Amino acid sequence: ATCIVHYDMWQLNPSEQEVWSTRQEAEPHQVILGRIERDGKKKHHAGLTECLRTMLAGERALFHLPPSLCYGEEGHFSFPAVPPDCWMLADVELIGIKGSTDEPEMERSDMLYEERIERVKTHREHGNDLFRAGDTEGAAREYEM
């Protein structure tokens, strides 16, 4: 399944330094459950996938993530700098879910400009239908996709 998600992550140590924030980027991330790597590069932490597996669309929750699901024993010494064996605090908001495990929705980065515009129109129309039906929360989730 393709999850549309906002998340913030902080180090759970005396520094409490923020490691990542999709909210500051102003655009939610698209996460395909089960796909942590793409083209040999890590796209997101296994911890984020584990958080999303426990959530329902529209839910927001806080999670304490062990080092094994984040930066591990080694930590990370370039941006973002994270010390070894560092636990993380994740504030995760699952905005919506599209597709299925067998057929996830195509990633935005793989789409042509025209395909992205068409997807936006579809989400807007669906959001408008939900709004007219009185489901303002569902409409808001659809508009954020």
Image (cartoon, grey):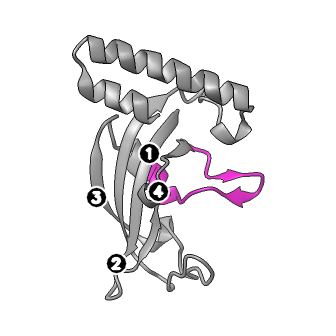
Circles 4 and 1: CB atoms closer than 8 Å: yes
Question: Which of the two discs, 2 and 3, labels the residue nearer the N terminus?
Answer: 2
**From mark 4 to mark 1, how far is it between C-alphas?**
8 Å
Identify whether 14 is placed above or below 124: below
The residue sitting at the left extreme is: 134
* Nearest-to-viewer mark from 1 and 2: 1
Q: CA distance from mark 1 to mark 2?
A: 21 Å
Q: Are marks 3 and 4 in contact (CB under 8 Å)?
A: no
Residue 40 is a magenta residue:
yes
Residue at 67% of width from left, 53% of height from top?
Answer: 37
Q: Which mark is residue 5?
A: 1
Q: In 3D space, how far apart are the residues under numbered discs 3 and 4 (Cα atoms)?
A: 15 Å
- Return the residue at label 4: 22
Q: Residues within 10 Å of mark 1 (few under 14, many from 20)?
A: many
Q: Amino acid at mark 1?
A: Val
**Which of pointers 3 and 1 lies earlier in the amino acid sequence?**
1
**In the rendered image, which residue does mark 3 sit on?**
62
Q: Nearer the viewer, mark 3 or mark 4?
A: 4
In this rendering, is residue 80 above or below 59?
below
* Range of magenta residues: 33-50
Q: Residue 143, position in %: x, y?
A: 41, 30
Q: Is residue 119 above or below residue 44?
A: above
**If you read the primary sequence from the N terminus, does the residue marked by circle 2 or circle 4 appear first?**
2
Rendered location of residue 49, percent (x, y)? 48, 50
Alpha-carbon neighbours of circle 4 within 10 Å: few (<14), some, or many (≥20)?
Answer: some
For residue 58, side relative to residue 45 (left or right): left
For the residues bearing labels 2 and 4, Cβ distance under 8 angstroms: no
Residue at 50% from the left image edge and 86% from the top image edge: 83
**Which element type, helix, strand or loop, lies under badge 4?**
helix
* Residue at image mark 2: 12
Front one among 18 and 99: 18
